[in-house]
Amino acid sequence: MQVDPRTPTTKNPPERFTGDVWLDPIAYPREGGQRMVVAKVRFAPGARTAWHSHALGQTLHVTQGVAWVQSRGGEKIEAHPGQTIYCPPGEEHWHGATPDSFMEHLAMLDNGDDPATTTTWLEHVTDDEYRG
């Protein structure tokens, strides 16, 4: 058994996020064959990811606030604490907080065969797409 020291919160980069978004790592691969990555991600009101996809999919579990999540070409959905959203492999999507509420979720995914290709980052979500 291993108890990890607390890892400092980091602010996510503006190249991949609009607004203020903070990340706390929870789990990461430690031994051969392991792929799981889990992070607690907190979004300020109106903050959101850029469009992106994941090689092996992503699961989001909302823990606080209200989340907006949208797949490219799909309807924007609203998720509340306790709800879980699954984004399949390769599906382009974004997620973030509503304009008037902070939001926190657990982001869970598996690293791809090459961890550098786990997430493909695309263009920013426009204000019109976000309000859509």
Image: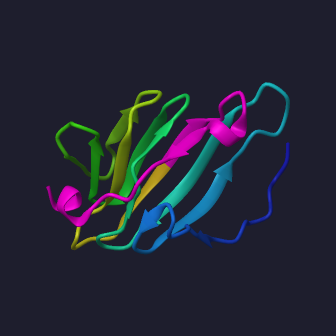
Q: Nearer the viewer, residue 86 or 14?
A: 14
Residue 58 pos. (x, y %): 48, 36
Residue drawn at x 65%, y 57% is: 25
Q: Which residues are magenta?
A: 107-132
Q: Quadrant of the N terminus?
A: top right
Residue 30 pos. (x, y %): 82, 39
Asked if 44 appears above or below 39 in the picture, the reply is below
Residue drawn at x 55%, y 28% is: 56
Residue drawn at x 31%, y 52% is: 81
State left or right for residue 41 relative to residue 44: right
Residue 46 magenta-highlighted: no
Asked if 26 appears above or below 73 in the picture, the reply is below
Residue 29 pos. (x, y %): 76, 39
Colour treatment of the image:
rainbow
Residue drawn at x 22%, y 70% is: 99
Question: As drawn, which residue projects farthest toward the left?
Answer: 132
Give the number of callouts.
0
Residue 129 magenta-highlighted: yes
State left or right for residue 64 relative to residue 70: right
Asked if 83 appears above or below 44 in the picture, the reply is above
Please tell me in which quadrant of the rendered image residue 43 appears: bottom left
Please tell me in which quadrant of the rendered image residue 45 appears: bottom left
Q: Nearer the viewer, residue 90 or 67?
A: 90
Q: Quadrant of the C terminus?
A: bottom left
Residue 3 pos. (x, y %): 81, 54
